[in-house]
Amino acid sequence: MSNYNSAAIEEFNGGIWVFCEQRQGKMMPTSFELISEGRKLADELGSKLYGLLLGSNVEGIAKELGGYGADGVYVCDSPLLENYTTDGYTKVICDVIREYKPEAMLIGATNIGRDLGPRCAARLHTGLCADCTHLDIDVPKYKDFLRSASTLAPAMIDSIKEDDRNLKMTRPAFGGHLMATIICPRFRPAMATVRPGVMKKAAFDQAKADACQIIKPNFSLTEADLDTQVVEVVKAAKKMVDLIGADVVVSVGRGISKDVEGGIKLAEELAEVLGGVVGGSRATIDSGWLSADHQVGQTGKTVHPKIYVALGISGAIQHKAGMQDSECIIAVNKNESAPIFEIADYGICGDLFKVTPLLIEAIKTAKAAK
Amino acid sequence: MDFVLSKEHQMLRKMYREFAENEVKPLAAEIDEEERFPTETVEKMAKLGMMGIYFPKEYGGAGGDILSYAMCVEELAKVCGTTAVIVSAHTSLCCAPIFEHGTEEQKKKYLPDLLSGKKIGAFGLTEPNAGTDASGQQTTAVLEGDHYVLNGSKCFITNGTVADTIVVFAMTDPKAGNHGISAFIVEKSFPGFSVGKHEKKMGIRGSSTCDLIFQDCIVPKENLLGQEGKGFKIAMMTLDGGRIGIASQALGIGEGAIDEAVKYTQERVQFKKRLSQFQNTQFQLADMHTRMQAAQYLVYAAAMKKQNHEPYSMDAAMAKLFAAEAASDVTRRAVQLFGGYGYTREYPVERMMRDAKITEIYEGTSEVQRMVIASHLGVK
Amino acid sequence: MKIIVCVKQVPDTSGKVAVNPDGTLNRASMAAITNPDDLNAVEAALSLKEQTGAEIIVVSMGPPPAEGMLREVMARGVDRAVLVSGREFGGSDTYATSQILAAAINKIGVGPEDIVMCGRQAIDGDTAQVGPQIAEKLGLPQVSYAAEIKKDGDTLTIKRMLEDGYMTIKVKTPCLITCIKELNTPRYMSVNGIFECYAKPYEIFDYNTLKDDPLIDPSTIGLKGSPTNIFKSFTPPQKGVGMMLEGADKATCDKLAGILAAKHMI
């Protein structure tokens, strides 16, 4: 079969690669995260780490990747690669991979990465694991991870053989209720798309950036290779998110009554740093502080965001009905016996007008540190 | 005997339920509060064939059966009694008599628009002085050449303000009593027809209920439905079928209240226990469910009999009597399980309790159903 | 013109998800539903049918009970359905699944005017890989994350969503499109549709039906033909009961932010 990946896996000794996505000539943050993670994996494997950068006039942004750990960057430059196209990028990447034979390839699980990864894996006839949140090569390190992040019995973890050298790609399934570690033992490169924001960016090292090697592989790409045509690329203004689809909801309750405007403003600021929207309990809607489309609860909307923050909400049953299935509930309330604390993952007993500004700062700091 | 629903009926249940949950339930409190007819919901139901479920495709119906219609009203009523009665009155009280008693020309003229939901139907029998005693009709129809002239008024007409096509009863021969009543198909555009006052009701507040006024209303001769003098029979046959619809509505309201009560009592904590852990709650819910399950068997049996063209008048009367009284009882108990919250409009059970009451009254009060049942028993 | 839509039956993970003591998913406790994104693909196909009169065929790989789901899809207006089902196909990863579905689509036949549609991803695996991999196996151009589709002759203009905006892409038929929920609101089954769906053409493609396709090779399908294997599966630690943080000062807030960061929630 023409597309059958027949090369022996030992021949794939070209190091670990990271597809470094750029948009409009600007590196996507996830590229730095993956280079940083890739460095660790390459060290575990005892091999080199390379970035793979496609675009038009992008060589100038390649060396920065060295500062996060890349030994070198393969740069494929062509006017036809200016905008991402599935056909153009897949052709170039597969040709270059076939020539240089990397052992593993990481791709950021962006909308583009998740379009590109499967297409390349299908063409190369290799395995791809989607949207990974954890990667290991060394088994002892993987065992440590299982000890902290799984409910597996210690004996079961101890019994895992330590000679496996495959890339172990761990990902959530079934909405995060199950985790699976996937390997690709018979084909190379083992491919993974990795969820943006999960891997930690390393400290930037200018000396390493300067030392980063730029490699320009030969590749051919013509207009005839492209079946899709990008007519325009539009950067959207900040999207309005509705309550139901929001990943984060920051809701206010009767607790803001002493300074309604101030309370709502704080909620908006907290929602802004968390990337979410503002909701409210029935009291805030009935009092006319927020419009009806903000209402969470029995007579309002039912939400299940990743993070639900309840500011000054006591947690009456009809409010809980609308938010109790949220993944992580954070409650701030002055009354320590407020029912909201019974369902909160994290409760802070205090004045929301004092706590919220501190929380905003703390989250900003934590995000900046990532 | 087979108590298992066919694959199609199971699929219908799922479809009705998804539709009711997503499209009907979110509006239920609002249309009740504002006494607003949910035109947008009717348009959506029309697209899905829900305004002509059990009529043949040749007239624009969906080609379903009576059971699939009963299930539709039931599932709608679980979340909104108003929406359920809109479908029931339209289907059973207007589409059905035209389909069952109309001439081919009448069926071809009126059914496609009604069954596709482009037009809404109503039924005009009740008058201020002719309620349970429907034979006391005072509206008159006089034949003058190629048309009848109707004079009089009707009251408590469901879908009245929104209906385009109305099956109306009037005396063509006042001396002949029941045998002097005739049925007509009246269009709202007919000269001399107008809509009177809108009733403010205890429940089903989103359904439009109003007076119809006929002032020298001109109805073409060809719009006589059935024969002259056969109107009372048409009305009674129509109400037999309508009772399956109202029984289904009552069934759904009761079941909907149980759904709400099961959910609430599992969430609500008092004395450090979920309400559902108290034996009183468990016994109440067990009784409530048993009653509604019994009602469902009666309703479905009546629907199947009508479908199979067996006599079903007594079955429909029993189904409506039992389902309506069970719905009133079950919704009242649901409010009690909710306690204070149940009495507020924050939760739907108080609305369900208000909606349930009408099912004991319209399309024949419970007392009329008992009369029908007793007469079938031969008790005189 | 034909539109072939791939659909999958999945456990409903939006409600409560039950996990067996051994860490596997208790599928029996969960309702089986049509994958939500796939319904957006079906809806997109149905609206193109209204515009072009195209025939719509759904294809699913799964066990025989998936017929119920396919009948439901036909009750929404789809013309016919194919269930790809066979022991030999069991245990397939996304790569092997794509080989098999591509072979089934080849069997149906993709003509010059035809379109293949998929949902972006299924809620059980959330991989978003099968659509693009089918496109590769069929040699079709693909456009994923479609939020708007306009057809003019043989050219489709598609709004392809990015995290920070969108691209407008032109592509000619035949092609493969993966659909997201922003594309449309799936219609309900209709009463008429439900009473018609069991009379519509329904076929099962098993191993024998597809075995002559070069894509169907024991080394590229099923568990043995899958490039990826599960090394370990496990459940994450259960969500603990609520935790009251001490104090309400800067240290408390820093601690909370630290926890959220460690859990990748911010």
Image: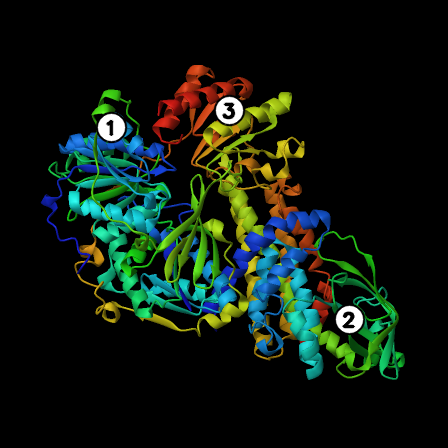
Kind of residue at disc 3:
Val
Q: Which chain contains the residue that carries disc 1? A: A
Q: Which chain contains the residue that carries disc 3? A: A
Kind of residue at disc 2:
Glu
Q: Do tags 1 and 3 sit on the same chain?
A: yes
Residue at the spot of label 1 = A66
Q: Can residue B288 be spotted in the picture?
A: no
List x then y, in percent, for residue C123.
38, 49
Q: Quadrant of the N terminus of chain A?
A: bottom left
Q: Work out whether A242 lies above or below B156.
A: above
Return the mark for residue B187.
Answer: 2
Instruction: Between label 2 and label 1, give the one nearer the viewer.
Output: 1
Return the mark for residue A332.
Answer: 3
Nearer the N terminus, badge 1 or badge 3? Answer: 1
Instruction: Between label 2 and label 3, give the one nearer the viewer.
Output: 2
Q: Which chain contains the residue that carries disc 2? A: B
**Mark 2 and 3 residues: CB-CB less than 8 Å, in contact?**
no
**Residue found 28% across the figure and 22% down from its top:** A203
Q: Secondary structure at mark 2?
A: strand
List x then y, in percent, for residue A142.
20, 34
Circle 3 residues within 10 Å: few <14, some 14–19, many ≥20: many
Nearest the viewer among C167 and B118 is C167
Kind of residue at disc 1:
Gly
Nearest the viewer among A22 and C60 is A22
Nearest the viewer among A364 and B280 is A364
